Image (tube, helix red, strand yellow):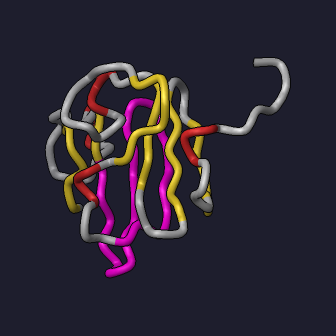
């Protein structure tokens, strides 16, 4: 895509912020929902699998919570919720998820 193009999956929603990582992207909307799309390897999308996602998909693990920030890293992702909790998922090598191990995490897990 050489020119900016509106992401139709967000029609009718107000996107508050986005974060682009190498191979995947994250966003959160005004209603507090988190979304991800792109390369799903290592579980970095937070959908419980390692599948590619060609369109933004809501991260269902945050149902009932309000996401207020997201960050896409190299193979992993982070989010913060309105209650002050930090969450991470994806590639856990080098301890990057903050869970005290190097395991991959396919779904968001509270740090």
Which quadrant, please, contains the C terminus? bottom left
Q: In the image as oriented, which residue stretches furthest toward the bottom?
A: 83
Q: Residue 38, how many percent across, how many down?
A: 47, 26
Which quadrant, please, contains the N terminus? top right
Q: Residue 105, how many percent across, how many down?
A: 19, 39
Q: What residue sits 50% from the left and 57% below the top? A: 28
Give the dominant element type of the magenta stretch: helix, strand or loop.
strand
Q: Residue 9, how many percent across, how many down?
A: 54, 40
Q: In the image as oriented, which residue stretches furthest toward the front?
A: 12
Q: In the image as oriented, which residue stretches furthest toward the right?
A: 3
- Residue 77: in magenta span: yes
**Would you identify the image quadrant in which residue 41 lies?**
top left
Q: What residue sits 37% from the left and 47% below the top? A: 58
- Residue 57: in magenta span: no
Number of marks in the image? Answer: 0
From which residue to which does the magenta span run? 66-88
Q: What residue sits 40% from the left and 58% below the top? A: 79
> Relative to 42, does residue 45 appear above or below in the rendering?
below
**Would you identify the image quadrant in which residue 3 lies?**
top right
Q: In the visual, does 83 lie left or right of 35?
A: left
Nearer the observer, 66 or 90:
66
Q: In the visual, does 94 lie left or right of 67?
A: left
> Relative to 73, does residue 42 appear above or below in the rendering?
above
Q: What residue sits 35% from the left and 25% below the top? A: 40
> Relative to 58, does residue 68 appear above or below in the rendering?
below
Nearer the observer, 102 or 34:
34
């Amino acid at each position: 895509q050489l020119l900016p193009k509106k992401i139709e999956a967000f029609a009718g929603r107000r996107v508050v912020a986005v974060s682009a990582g190498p191979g995947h992207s994250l966003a959160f909307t005004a209603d507090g929902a988190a979304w991800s799309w792109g390369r799903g390897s290592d579980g970095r999308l937070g959908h419980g699998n390692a599948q590619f996602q060609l369109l933004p998909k809501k991260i269902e693990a945050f149902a009932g919570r309000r996401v207020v920030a997201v960050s896409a890293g190299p193979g992993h992702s982070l989010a913060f919720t309105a209650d002050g909790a930090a969450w991470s998922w994806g590639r856990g090598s080098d301890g990057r998820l903050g869970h005290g191990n190097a395991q991959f995490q396919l779904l968001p897990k509270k740090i």
